[in-house]
Image (cartoon, grey):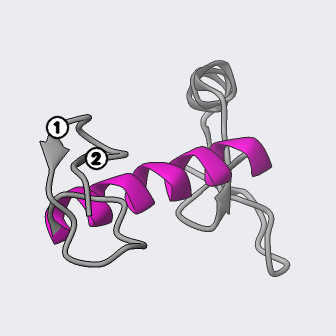
Amino acid sequence: MEKQRCDNCDRQFQPAKSWQRFCTPKCRDAWHYEQWKLAQADVGQVNGHGAVSGTAIVEAIKSRVAPVIAENGLRRRAL
């Protein structure tokens, strides 16, 4: 097999398998983690919760109401 470039770090390496795309397991895991983060951003979610804008947080603080995600029937609570 001929050398190829890693999909994550673009370093040249000699693959052990014909289907190998990454030079190390660390590069493979880093690439998959970045893909996961991009997929979460596309959906507008971070760690399984809806994304909250910084402006919404500031407005909630000014109004003295803690920003609680209204998922699973939770409500906002007073500070």
Residue drawn at point x = 65 percent, y = 18 percent: 55
Q: Position of residue 26 (x, y in %)?
A: 16, 63
Quarter-of-image position of residue 73? bottom right
| Percent position of residue 28, x then y | 30, 63
The amino acid marked with disc number 1 is Arg
Disc 2 marks which residue?
6
Is residue 40 highlighted in magenta? yes
Q: Amino acid at mark 2?
A: Cys
The 10 Å Cα crowd at callout 1, few under 14, some 14 to 19, many 20 or more, is few
- Please report whichever mark, 1 or 2, sits nearer to the chain's N-terminal start: 2
Q: Are marks 1 and 2 in contact (CB under 8 Å)?
A: yes
Position of the N terminus, as image quadrant, is: bottom left
Query: SS class of the residue under badge 2?
Result: loop
Spatial CA distance of label 1 from label 2 is: 5 Å
Q: Which residue is mark 1?
A: 11
**Magenta segment, principal secondary structure?**
helix
Residue at 60% x, 35% y is 64
Judge the density around disc 2: few (<14), some (14-19), many (≥20) Cα neighbours within 10 Å.
some
* Magenta part of the chain: 25-43
Q: Residue at x 16, y 40 (%)?
A: 12
Image height of 20 relative to 44, above or below: below
Q: Is residue 66 above or below residue 19?
A: above
In the image as oriented, which residue stretches furthest toward the right? 73
Residue depicted at x 25% and y 54%: 2
For mark 1, give the secondary structure: loop
The foreground one among 48 and 33 is: 33
Q: Is residue 67 visible?
A: no
Question: Is residue 35 shown to the viewer in this render?
Answer: yes
Q: Position of residue 75 (x, y in %)?
A: 78, 66
